[in-house]
Amino acid sequence: MKLCVLQGTFNPIHKAHLAMADYVKKNYDYDRILFVPAYMPPHKKFDTKMAKHRFQMVKLALGDEKFFEISDFEFQNERFSYTYLTILELYKKYKIDGKIGFIIGSDAFEKIESWYETDKLKELVNFIVFPRETRINGAGFASLQNKGYKFTLTKMEPIELSSTELREKLVKKQSVSAFVPDTVLEYINKNELYRQK
């Protein structure tokens, strides 16, 4: 199976995440895209109470799309969600054809050398990089390529949308219906998430 992974905090998942996955589905030769919500993101403030909510929101966002699947792997051990360890486990779980694809924003990819076991990770995946802004650090990308990071830069127009911005809108009680699936918005409202404390 040709597998592609979209890993993230998804706090909350939004339409830009789904647009990237849909772009890969249409333009790359993968059999499945696996959404992997991080249980405990190593580089972000962690709220244990939100972990299960984030997982449920991803599940709702994917709906009955057969090409997309959600993984609870990082929730099973309740530990820091290191990409390298997750990718190793996916190779054990699935009969992978070629290398696993890994969807990533250009801003995160520029910092890839700070990731846990990055030298080992780069041997296991092909990065699919989505521009997060109109200007790309060409020299930085060339340097990563010279260091053995395999990647392709997509031609999808950047979608300037972040989970941080959505949370700020929700705290201010501004509408986010244009940015998140209806099922996710209903879940947020029902569970009173992202309310000002």
Image (cartoon, grey):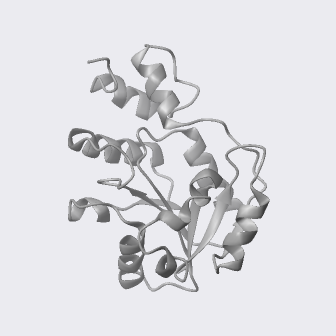
Determine whether 97 is above or below 26 in the image.
Answer: below
User: In the drawing, does residue 20 fall left or right of residue 92?
Assistant: right
When the figure is inspected, residue 26 is found, relative to residue 86, above or below; the finding is above
Q: On the picture, is 10 further left or further right than 147?
A: left
How many labels, in total? 0
Tell me if residue 33 can be seen. Answer: no
Quadrant placement of the C terminus: top left
Q: Quadrant of residue 4?
A: bottom right
137 or 78, nearer to the observer: 137
Q: Position of residue 128 (x, y in %)?
A: 64, 65
Q: As rendered, which of 46 and 2 lies closer to the eye?
A: 46
The residue at 41%/46% (across/down) is 58
The image position of residue 170, as x and y in percent, is 43, 21
167 lies left or right of 133 = left
Looking at the image, residue 194 sits to the left or right of residue 139; the answer is left
Residue 80 quadrant? bottom left
In the image, residue 37 sits, relative to residue 101, either above or below, namely: above
Instruction: Name the residue: 52% across, 29% down.
Output: 165
Residue at point 44%, 60% (across, down)? 69
The spot of residue 180 in percent (x, y) is: 51, 33
Q: Is residue 75 in view from this perspective?
A: yes
Please report the residue visible at 27 percent of the width from the left and 45 percent of the height from the top: 51
